[in-house]
Image (tube, rainbow, N blue to C red):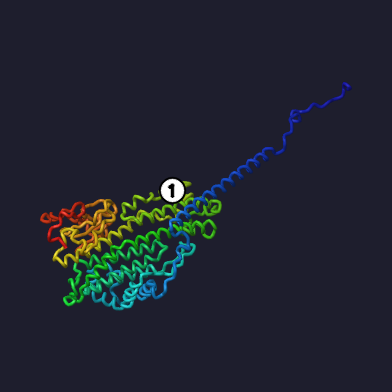
Amino acid sequence: MPADEHVDEPTSDQARPIPPRYWWLKRILLAAGVLILTLAVLRWWWGWEAERRLEAKIAEYRAAGQPVTFEDFQFPPIPDDENAALLLRKAAAAIVVPADSPVGIDDVCDELSAVADWAEDVGRLLEVNASALQLAREARSRVHADWQVQMSSPVIRVLLPDLGPQRNLAKLLSAGALYQHHCGNDVAAVETLRDALSQGQRVDQMRGFLISHFVAVAIDGFVANAIEEVAPILQVAPRGDGTEVNRGAARREQVAALTAELLDDEPPREDWCWAMFAERLLMLDSLDFVTRGRMGLSALAGTGIGGSVGRLKVIARPMFQLDVASSLDYYTAIAEAGASDSYPAARAIMPPAPQPYSGIERTAHILSLLLLQTGDRALAINYHSMATRRLAATALAIRLYELDHGRRPRTLNPLVPQYLPVLPTDPFAPDGRPVGYFPSAPKPIVYSVGPDGNDDGGEYALRESGAVDWDAKDLPFFLDGDRPRQADPRLATQPAATQAVDDQSDKIDHGRQTDESQTADDQP
């Protein structure tokens, strides 16, 4: 090579090897593909597992003979001439309140003194509603009720137009019983109370809805309130015919029938279970409705809640399914608990109520947050109704004893078996004791220990409104009809008082009447 020939030397940049183009992009795409495949597999497994768990729950309920689907809530039609619901619906529709009437049904359905103060106006109110009262009487002879409510999806939007009118009819019946008693017609008063109690049972046959069960509970409450007013001076014909002495006196078989109906716990227990199974169906139906895009979570809740979750509802279906599966177990447990003999027994098998969620848990449990009804309060209301019915039945038995012996029994023991088949147990007591009894208190009562399970010796508390607070202390039923009704700061807590000193022979042990306390003149 000639000496003057120049050869260019490679620069440092030119000396570097050239890498494969976009190697980093290829790796990212490969990693993304692996991640997507992994997520797809996980989503498939998650959906399979959630579906498996939910189907296993449904199969378990079916195996137990429990209603699960819409088909299980479709009942055979009842012929019109056997259907009590048609008569009760017609009775409620027939109710009128004259425009010039100074009193309404609400004013006089609970208190005898209100009926006495407005006797003429109440009589006119009942006269114009005689057809409604007669239809309710006819309905009592029909043991089945088909309210013709079709369970359909979405369950949450099914309308129940009969519940409000039936409440109104129950108030009219209670007012009618109080007025008839005020007029000395106790034979009619007891029959009207039986009409109202029967009406409540027929409303409870609107199976598929928890609210219908609680309307039936409210109707039972109207009946118990009226009995508390009527029982203290209820007139009952003596043994034998006796109608020649007082044609307005109730017959003994009437009072015995009313007492037996109050003590019959089986229909309310069965209807409670159906109500809980219906709440279970509501959860299943809402799951299907939301995840298939037929309703948003915001529409389900009636608020703007859950919008961001709603946009991902197809992907998040397994999350909803697992949430619903746990809710189904909760409602099943509530149904079983409500069939227990007592509130303490029910609480012993009740799972704890779902606790408030925070953070991501709120999203994972969004359906149960929107729809789940916690069971403890509902159970307490259910057993409160049972306790009140038993107290009312006991009060009627005490009144019959009083008419036969000229005084109330010193204990409840003499009521068995002539006036009661057995002593009613207190459904709130943890030890299965009978209901409590204080005949010599300033305000004589029979009582239940109430939801706290503690026997406070018949002591009860009042709310600010003046009504008895059944959440605090004991639950009383006033044998003289003198229930506190007006707010009075001097009556913050009212003890039923211990028995009088000269009445120690009763020997009441925490509300339980002992056989040793029964004196010769206490024998039936």
The amino acid type of the residue labelled 1 equals Tyr
Return the residue nearer the eye: 367 or 493: 367
Q: Can see residue 347?
A: yes
- Of 338 and 385, nearer the camera is 338
Q: Horizontal and vertical percent for residue 443?
A: 18, 60
Q: Residue at x 21, y 54 (%)?
A: 512
Residue at 52% in and 59% down:
295
Q: Which residue is mark 1?
A: 357
Image quadrant containing the C terminus: bottom left
Q: Quadrant of residue 391?
A: bottom left
In the image, taking residue 410 as reference, residue 391 lies left or right, namely right
Residue 485 seen in the figure = no
Q: Is residue 318 above or below residue 400?
A: above
User: x, y (%) of residue 508?
Assistant: 18, 53
As helix, strand or loop, the secondary structure at mark 1 comes to loop
Q: Position of residue 113 (x, y in %)?
A: 22, 69
